[in-house]
Each structure stands twice: as C-alpha cells, then as structure tokens.
C-alpha cells in the first residue's frame, strides 16, 4: 500500500486545496490517505471569520471527522486543545510533540512507512496564511529528518520557476485525470490533476459552521477543476507509481 500523509493547518484545508484529487486517489486500491490537522498547535480555535450564523468556529472539530469519513480517508486526527500554550515564533519541537502524539494515536507508527507527505505551500496558499506557512515549514523539516518524500499543493503554477513538460500522453483512472507533469529543476517537479470538483464542494458544505458562500467567493481553488502539486525528486517514484496505475488514453500525441 502507498501511505500518503496529508498535514494541514485547519479543518477544511483537507478539502479546499487538493480535495478533488485526494478523493479520487482513495478509489485506488493501493492508496491510503491519512490526515493530521495541526489546528490548536498553530492558533486558538475560534478565530475564523467566515462562520455560519448559529455556529461557532469550534464546531468544525466534529465536522472534520464527518468530512474525512465522507471523503473516504483512511485515518484522520484533529489536534484540538484550547489549553495549548501558543508560541509566537516557529518552534519545531513544540509542534512536533503534538504532531507525534496524533501520529501515534492513529497508529501510523505501526505502518511500514509513510511514502509521501502532502501539505501547504511555502507562500501560505491564496491568503498567505501564517498558519499554512508554519505547517509547510514543520512538514518539510519533519519529512527531511525522517527521509519521507515531500510535496505541497499550489493552486497556480509558481512564477519564476521553469516548468519543462514531460507528459506526451493523457492518463486517467476512477475519474482522476493527469493533465501535466513537469520538471522544474534537479529536485523539484510539478504534477497537475483534474479530480471531482462536485465531491469537493459537497464535502465543504458538510462544514455547517463554515460560511460556504463566503469561502466560495474568496478562494479560487474552489472554482477550479484542476489541482497542482509540487514534489521533490525523492517523491518521483511514488508519483510514477500512481501514474502507472492509470489508464493510457492517448499514445505519443506529440
């Protein structure tokens, strides 16, 4: 089995940025999607503005588990503790302690290995959210220290990075379409998928505490049918494994 670990900052991040693709990947018989959300390690739950009338931000705690089940994720855990002592500056050891507790609760330590980590972009995604940036820093450091292939999603291709296309065929499986595979430099690659946007939006609506209309207006990633992922060279084998399980639709069209 290919064990993928998604590390997010907030409940609903597992949907907004790469949810269409992740859902389709759960249909692959050899892939498990696991999720750890760092929420209260990064901020005091209750600070989000886009809350539906009659709900509290903290209501997202229970809704997170309903959404992950709806998305067919394998194992998932939300770190939620209002008593956590928040720290102003990035502290790897502090986040690591809460993260590894969640990791062990999910019994991910009993797996043979985690094959790929997926997380937020270094620039904090569309809103440059500091919690997303911190999650990226932590995830990258953790993956490096534990020799786990690392990747991060990005709604748009990042400017000033060369994208040299490698794909000369179309592939798809279980509603997942491979649209782009590119080499950026010696240690960075980019892959773009089209997944199930309808499922993604239905999942977000299960977050009753979230003002869906406000989110839909403010996040471009909720209106796009494509999702992109940057990954380091050591993740290439995993991405190729995924592609090899897809069906070749065209043959050498270029």
Image: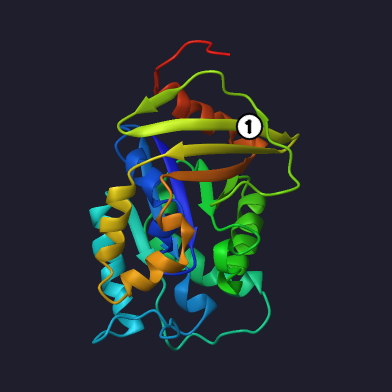
Q: Secondary structure at mark 1?
A: strand
Q: Position of residue 49 (x, y in %)?
A: 42, 83
Q: What residue is at 24 percent from the left and 65 percent from the top?
A: 206
Which residue carries the number 1 mark? Answer: 182
Residue 229: name its quadrant. Answer: top right
Up/down of 93 relative to 181, above or below: below
Q: Position of residue 137 (x, y in %)?
A: 65, 62
How packed is label 1: few (under 14 Cα within 10 Å), some, or many (20 or more)?
some
Q: What residue is at 42 percent from the left and 52 percent from the top?
A: 108
Residue, far front: 217
User: Who is closer to the viewer here, 128 or 222?
Assistant: 222
How is the protein colored in the picture? rainbow
Can residue 248 be seen here? The reply is: yes
Residue 23: name its quadrant. Answer: top left
Q: What residue is at 30 percent from the left and 57 percent from the top?
A: 201
User: Who is closer to the viewer here, 217 or 197?
Assistant: 217
Residue 236: name its quadrant. Answer: top right
Q: Is residue 132 left or right of residue 45?
A: right
Up/down of 9 relative to 165, above or below: below
Q: Is residue 125 left or right of residue 20?
A: right
Up/down of 159 relative to 37, above or below: above
Q: Position of residue 191 (x, y in %)?
A: 55, 37
Q: Position of residue 41 (x, y in %)?
A: 51, 76
Can residue 11 be seen here? The reply is: no
Q: Is residue 58 left or right of residue 109?
A: left
Q: Quadrant of the N terminus?
A: top left
């Amino acid at each position: 089995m290919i064990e993928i670990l998604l590390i997010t900052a907030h409940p609903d991040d597992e949907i907004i940025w790469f949810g269409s693709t992740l859902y389709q990947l759960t249909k692959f018989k050899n892939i498990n999607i696991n999720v750890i959300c760092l929420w209260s390690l990064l901020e005091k739950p209750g600070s989000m503005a886009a809350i539906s009338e009659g709900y509290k931000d903290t209501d997202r705690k229970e809704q997170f588990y309903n959404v992950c089940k709806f998305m067919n994720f394998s194992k998932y855990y939300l770190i939620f503790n209002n008593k956590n002592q928040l720290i102003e500056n990035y502290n790897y050891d502090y986040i690591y302690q809460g993260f590894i507790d969640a990791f062990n609760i999910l019994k991910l330590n009993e797996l043979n290995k985690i094959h790929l980590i997926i997380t937020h972009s270094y620039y904090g995604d569309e809103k440059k959210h500091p919690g997303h940036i911190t999650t990226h820093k932590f995830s990258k450091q953790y993956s490096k220290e534990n020799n786990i292939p690392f990747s991060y999603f990005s709604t748009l291709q990042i400017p000033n990075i060369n994208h040299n296309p490698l794909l000369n065929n179309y592939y798809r499986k279980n509603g997942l379409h491979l649209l782009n595979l590119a080499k950026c430099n010696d240690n960075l690659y980019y892959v773009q998928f089209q997944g199930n946007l309808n499922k993604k939006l239905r999942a977000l609506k299960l977050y009753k505490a979230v003002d869906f209309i406000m989110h839909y207006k403010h996040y471009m990633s909720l209106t796009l049918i494509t999702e992109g992922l940057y990954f380091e060279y050591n993740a290439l084998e995993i991405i190729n494994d995924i592609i090899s399980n897809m069906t070749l639709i065209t043959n050498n069209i270029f």
